[in-house]
Each structure stands twice: as C-alpha cells, then as structure tokens.
C-alpha cells in the first residue's frame, strides 16, 4: 500500500515513535516515549525536510520510497543537525545520490564534522528562497533554538511553518498527528517540560525568532517532535511567549532533600502553610525521588522557590546540589526565594543555598531556617511563618 499520511495535498508526514526509550539524551525521563517527525514536499522538485536517527532509518526509508513512488529526491533541507534528525543523512545520500543538501554556513561545517559529503550543498540565507516549481520555500534562521545552525522553513503556498525543534514536546504520538486529536490538558505539560529542559536556556533567542516567524501567515506549524499544530496554534504560541519571557504564575516550588525525615517535616509544614495562606499551586519535590527535569519545568512555571537541604559531607545534599546546577544553567530570572537547612552537629547548608540564589539575582523574601536535630514546635512555627511570608509575596 502506498504511504498516505499527509498534512496537505502536497506534503507527506513521516513519523517514528519510540515507546521503549526511557530517557531523552540519557537525561530527561520519557514516561510516554518520544516522537520523531519529518516531511516530504512534492512539487516539480521534491524536497525532504530532515531525516531521522539511524535506528529508525529502515522504517523511514520505506515511507520515503513509497511516497516518492519512483520519483527523484531533489533536495534535503537540513533544519537541525542534532543526530536524532540528521543521523540518516549519509544513508540517504547513498540511496539518493541525486539529492542536493540545503542549509546555512553553520550547517555545512557541522555536516563535514560528522563526515557527510558536502560536494552537492546549497548554502541559503533568509533572503534567498528555494524555488521548487509552484512555490518558493523561505528560510527563517533560528539560532540557539536550540543549536546555532537551526533554521525554519516556510511554505507560503500551504501557509505551513516547518519549525525544527520549536513547538515540540516529549511523548510518542498515539493515533493521529494533528493537535486537535490529543488532550491538551495532558499534552501541554510535556510541551512545557520539553521547552524548559531543551530550549529554556535561550529565551532571548526564542523571543527574536518568534518575532520573525509571527510576521508570516501561518495556518500549520510542523515540528520535528510531537503533534502538528493547526487548531491550537494560538495556545502554543502563547505558551512559548510565556516561557521565553520567563513569565511566572503565582505558585511555589519547594525543592528539598531529606535522609531521615527531619528536613522533610519542615518542607511539609511549609507546603501546608502556603496552601492555608491562599497559594493554590504548590509543588513539593523530594530530590531523592523527583526528576530534575520536572523541577526545571516547575521553576519556569511558578514565581516562588523554597530550597531545603540536610548537611552532607559538610555541604549541600548531592541530589539537591545536582538540581541546582541544572537550574543555574537555565538562567531563570526574577524568582522569589527562601531556604532552610538541617544537620545534627553542624548545620551547614544555609550559606551555600543563599549564595546560589543570590548568584541568580533572585529576591529573598523570608529569613532562612536552620534546624539542628529533630524539628521542635518552635521550628515548625517558624516554617509555618516562612510559608505565610512567601504566600504573601507571590500573591501580590
């Protein structure tokens, strides 16, 4: 049977689902697997947008061959060089020696670094469209969204923006690939987690790219991960605006570690106080169990951050230290913070936790709590007051 999945009359959708992959980039949990997309535009000249990880190459080439139906492949537009999208380029050139690679100057350098022959390479820029017959394809450079060579491709005839990694999400695609075929209540949090973990460091670059892309007449956004957007484009654009500007909701993330339950007792008291004082969005993350990936997503989302740690080897508990390292890489600004710490004979985490937050230029809203041994009634009252003060600050 000939391959049939299309996003319009002239553009095929090729999708590969990996339901066995548990970590993306061996870092980020994938409870629902991962989807990898690419696209073929058929016109007088046939154009493929990106390839796939080499482990999906056999399935991908079967789809491509069926859609081409014996016709030549004229161009491969390389929008993004990460190997989960470029890994099959070498195999493609063996099967289709007639193809011309299309990319920018940085693309060519990376291709050569990965050992791909660039004898037939067309360098493009934003002012040089690619004529393929009944349409011209326009390029929108998107540096650091999230690699320096990234570019989008715009098909004005079909009003479709092929957006590389932008507007993607974690998770395999169950059933149809259109956005309206999925529950946004469960899908959008994974789109949020994907952006904040993969692209989140580069908010200013995302803002500039959005400014350029939104000048186009767009009816479809086709990313290389996740669903294809057509009905809910306003919602995903607004999500990206919020994330790229680091806009925060009135909620609080409590990040803590606890070995024997004493630090956790303070975390629970703080969390209950936040709720009692009107904060409806409170998330507690015990770093012995929570993933850093979810913490990063939540700190992007909420205005307040409270960090607690027991003393370990005269410093911060390692799992808390690790998530702080990952958060620091994202350069998240303008958060409200407080800290708490514990230790049996030498509680020694308040200073490094506060120094970490001050390096982010976050705003301190409550005095720290230093706990020795088990929490007393007075310690719990102090934790309750910390929650009250933070609640008042985030709800202003």
Image: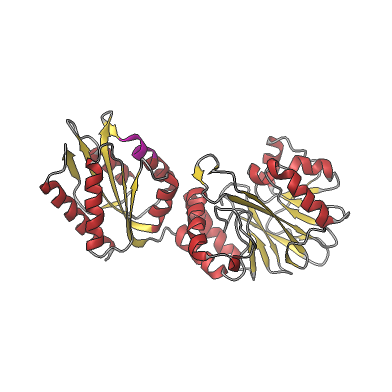
Q: Position of residue 60 (x, y in %)?
A: 74, 49
Q: Is residue 108 left or right of residue 372?
A: right
Residue 153 visible in the snapshot: yes
* Quarter placement of the N terminus: bottom right
Query: 329 above or below 2?
Result: above
Q: How is the image coloured?
A: secondary structure
Observer-nearest residue: 337 or 202?
Answer: 337
Residue 122 visible in the snapshot: no
Q: Position of residue 127 (x, y in %)?
A: 70, 59
For image coordinates 87% across by 53% down, the residue present is 72
**Rendered image quadrant of residue 343:** top left
Q: Is residue 368 magenta?
A: no
| Range drawn in magenta | 317-322
Q: Position of residue 88 (x, y in %)?
A: 73, 42
For image coordinates 28% across by 63% down, the residue present is 279
For image coordinates 44% across by 59% down, the residue present is 245
**Rendered image quadrant of residue 84:** top right
Q: Is residue 112 left or right of residue 281?
A: right
Q: Position of residue 327 (x, y in %)?
A: 40, 45
* Quarter placement of the C terminus: bottom left
Q: Is residue 321 magenta?
A: yes
* Residue furthest to the top: 313
Q: Is residue 299 left or right of residue 3?
A: left
Query: 273 above or below 181?
Result: above
Query: 82 above or below 243?
Result: above
* Residue furthest to the left: 378
Observer-nearest residue: 166 or 109?
Answer: 166
In this rendering, the count of numbered labels is 0
> Secondary structure of the magenta portion, mostly?
helix
């Amino acid at each position: 049977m000939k391959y049939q999945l299309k996003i319009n009359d002239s553009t095929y959708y090729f999708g590969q689902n990996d339901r066995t992959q548990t970590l993306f980039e061996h870092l980020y949990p994938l409870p629902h697997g991962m989807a990898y997309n690419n696209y073929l535009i058929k016109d007088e000249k046939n154009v493929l947008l990106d390839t796939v990880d080499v482990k999906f190459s056999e399935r991908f080439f079967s789809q491509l061959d069926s859609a081409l139906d014996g016709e030549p492949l004229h161009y491969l537009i390389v929008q993004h060089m990460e190997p989960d999208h470029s890994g099959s380029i070498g195999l493609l050139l063996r099967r289709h020696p007639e193809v011309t690679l299309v990319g920018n100057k940085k693309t060519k350098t990376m291709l050569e670094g990965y050992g791909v022959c660039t004898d037939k390479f067309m360098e493009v820029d934003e002012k040089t469209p690619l004529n393929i017959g009944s349409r011209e394809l326009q390029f929108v450079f998107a540096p650091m969204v999230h690699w320096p060579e990234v570019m989008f491709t715009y098909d004005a005839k079909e009003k479709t923006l092929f957006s590389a990694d932008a507007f993607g999400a974690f998770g395999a695609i169950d059933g149809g690939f259109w956005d309206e075929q999925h529950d946004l209540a469960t899908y959008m949090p994974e789109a949020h987690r994907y952006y904040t973990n993969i692209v989140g460091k580069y908010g200013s670059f995302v803002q500039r790219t959005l400014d350029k892309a939104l000048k186009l007449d767009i009816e479809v956004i086709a990313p290389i991960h996740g669903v294809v957007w057509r009905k809910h484009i306003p919602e995903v654009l607004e999500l990206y605006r919020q994330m790229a500007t680091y806009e925060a909701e009135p909620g609080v993330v409590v990040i803590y570690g606890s070995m024997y339950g004493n630090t956790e007792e303070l975390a629970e008291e703080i969390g209950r106080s936040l709720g009692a004082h009107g904060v409806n969005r409170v998330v507690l993350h015990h770093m012995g169990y929570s993933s850093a990936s979810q913490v990063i997503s939540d700190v992007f989302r909420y205005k307040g951050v409270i960090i607690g740690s027991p003393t370990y080897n005269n410093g911060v508990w390692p799992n808390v230290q690790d998530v702080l390292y990952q958060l620091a890489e994202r350069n998240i600004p303008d958060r409200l913070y407080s800290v708490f710490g514990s230790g049996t004979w030498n509680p020694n985490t308040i200073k490094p936790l506060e120094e970490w937050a001050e390096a982010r230029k976050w705003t301190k809203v409550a005095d720290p709590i230093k706990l020795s041994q088990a929490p007393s009634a007075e310690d719990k009252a102090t934790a309750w007051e910390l929650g009250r003060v933070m609640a008042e600050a985030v709800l202003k």
